[in-house]
């Protein structure tokens, strides 16, 4: 009898599974068969599919059960690619949410011209700015299209036609009973050729980035030079434009800034690239293996002057200015970054860059002297005496997720970094960062940390205002 009592006690103490959420939806407005996706919001505004159902024309109800709490999106797909409708639903723990989704089908008509002339056949991709899904639309040879549409709202669109070397990107609001998509692509054009400064030979496969400043906003598009070193941007709007060239084995030239307006519809550029001196190198990771697909940035006086990528054997060639010392910043696909100096009289032969192990982390906690959290700020970093340029910091963030700045709680967490000496300057504007860079050699950093293998923490206090 005592043994039985003990067993009953154990069974009574067994925790029951937590109740899960349910989403039910009734669909109105269309008799067509439907594909229904259930997406859940993840990190960085991404959406992940968690369930899918196919509904025949006779069924207008869906039910999704056993769901975690979170923000969900029900996406309805009709037979046509443009028949898409989304609804967001916030679901709490153990909630049951019921929703009626009403589709109001409409017809979207459009006409695309270039400088007042039909663009001909092509395609436009509409991206819903609220829900992020995309839908392709074919443009007829006369530059028109007519498609069904299930969701009004603001769309970002990309137009690609044979008459234009680069796509045209902009935004449009589709609203009302019969929205029309009428776009006259401007006839502004920026083209040019990229050559070697010494030999005059064309430089192919160089990335050409165009930044357009239009009414307080920025637009970015890029292309690569062809076998003859040529590039061509079409459909360019009036405004201030900046062209930057990123070659593979030459020094990067300064940016070209100019204005396109009604009087100037075409800008032609003849870009000559300085080959500098070639430094061959091989990058070896912390496990003594070749580091393939590593980004190598060459900096002189805090400015990136060249860049390259390693092959599968960890090898590449980088351009370095003649007669100048430089610093190599190496950012591999896995592991941590490395820094190495190149002397102005670097000896011939392949340089070996050994990447340190990603053995450390650093938590910086910022507070005011009266104990309050500091507003978010960015960090300029110096590692083992080498100042990290902003372009290198951007690459570290994009490729390794190393964000140099504080977030919620006034904390900055730098993970998978090498051990060594770190110095940090806080800043909030690009002007402040430029001032710090100019004076970094003679100004002591307010945050200095000797990072050792393992976890490291530092608390920093700023005078309260």
Image (tube, helix red, strand yellow):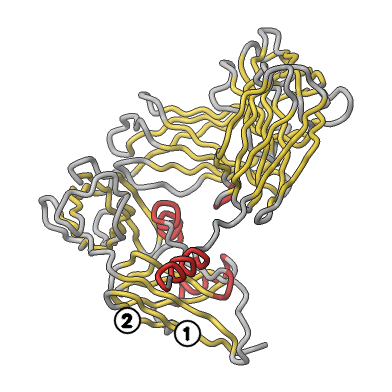
Whether residue 241 sits left or right of residue 191 in the image: it is right
Q: In the figure, 285 relative to 125: above or below?
A: below
Look at 32% across and 78% down and name the residue there.
451
Q: In which quarter of the image is the C terminus?
A: bottom right
Which of the pair 53/74 is nearer the observer? 53
Which of the pair 149/288 is nearer the observer? 149
Look at 71% across and 21% down and name the residue there.
115
Q: Quadrant of the N terminus?
A: bottom left
Q: In the figure, 337 relative to 207: above or below?
A: below
- Residue 118 shows which numbered tag? none
According to the picture, the residue beneath numbered tag 1 turns out to be 459
Look at 86% across and 22% down and name the residue there.
178
**Would residue 147 be visible to someone looking at this image?**
yes
Give the secondary structure at mark 2: strand
Whether residue 347 sits left or right of residue 374 in the image: it is left
Q: First in sequence: mark 2 or mark 1?
A: 2
Residue 291 placed where, x, y %?
Answer: 22, 49
Look at 47% across and 85% down and name the residue there.
459
Q: Residues within 10 Å of mark 1 (few under 14, many from 20)?
A: few
Residue 119 placed where, x, y %?
Answer: 66, 15
According to the picture, the residue beneath numbered tag 2 turns out to be 450
Give the secondary structure at mark 1: strand
Q: In the figure, 376 relative to 371: above or below?
A: above
Q: Count all numbered tags in the image, as a single digit.
A: 2
Which of the pair 413/425 is nearer the observer? 413
Which of the pair 387/319 is nearer the observer? 387
């Amino acid at each position: 009898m005592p043994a039985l009592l003990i067993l009953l006690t154990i069974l009574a103490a067994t925790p029951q599974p937590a109740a899960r959420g349910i989403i039910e939806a009734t669909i109105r407005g269309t008799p067509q068969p439907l594909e229904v996706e259930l997406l859940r919001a993840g990190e960085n505004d991404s959406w992940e599919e968690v369930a899918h159902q196919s509904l025949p024309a006779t069924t207008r109800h869906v039910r999704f059960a056993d769901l975690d709490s979170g923000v969900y999106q029900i996406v309805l797909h009709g037979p046509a690619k443009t028949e898409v409708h989304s609804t967001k639903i916030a679901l709490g723990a153990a909630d049951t949410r019921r929703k009626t989704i009403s589709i109001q089908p409409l017809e979207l008509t459009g006409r695309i011209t270039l400088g007042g002339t039909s663009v001909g056949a092509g395609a436009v991709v509409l991206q819903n700015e609220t829900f992020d899904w995309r839908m392709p639309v074919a443009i007829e040879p006369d530059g028109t299209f007519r498609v069904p549409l299930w969701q009004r709202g603001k769309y970002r669109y990309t137009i690609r036609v044979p008459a234009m070397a680069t796509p045209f990107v902009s935004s449009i609001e589709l609203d009302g009973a019969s929205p029309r998509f009428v776009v006259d692509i401007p006839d502004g054009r920026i083209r040019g050729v990229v050559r070697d400064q010494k030999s005059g030979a064309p430089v192919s496969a160089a990335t050409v980035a165009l930044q357009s400043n239009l009414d307080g906003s920025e637009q970015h598009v890029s292309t690569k030079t062809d076998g003859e070193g040529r590039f061509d941007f079409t459909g360019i709007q009036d405004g201030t434009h900046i062209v930057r060239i990123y070659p593979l084995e030459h020094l990067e030239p300064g940016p070209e800034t100019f204005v396109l307006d009604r009087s100037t519809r075409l800008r032609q550029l003849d870009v000559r690239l300085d080959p500098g001196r070639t430094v061959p190198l091989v990058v070896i990771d912390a496990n003594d293996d070749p580091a393939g697909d590593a980004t190598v940035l060459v900096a002189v006086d805090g400015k990136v002057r060249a860049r390259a990528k390693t092959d599968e054997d960890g090898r590449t060639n980088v351009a370095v200015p003649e007669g100048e010392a430089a610093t190599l910043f190496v950012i591999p696909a896995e592991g941590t970054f490395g820094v190495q100096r190149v002397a102005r009289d670097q000896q011939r032969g392949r340089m070996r860059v050994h990447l340190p192990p990603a053995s450390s982390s650093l938590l910086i906690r910022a507070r005011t002297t009266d104990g309050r959290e500091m507003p978010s700020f960015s960090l300029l970093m110096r590692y083992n005496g080498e100042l990290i340029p902003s372009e290198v910091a951007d690459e570290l963030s994009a490729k390794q997720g190393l964000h140099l700045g504080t977030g919620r709680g006034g904390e900055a967490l730098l993970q998978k970094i090498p051990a060594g000496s770190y110095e940090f300057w806080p800043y909030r504007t690009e002007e402040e960062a430029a001032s710090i860079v100019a004076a970094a050699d003679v100004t002591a950093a307010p945050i200095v940390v000797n990072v050792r293998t393992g976890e490291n923490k530092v608390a920093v206090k700023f005078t309260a205002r």
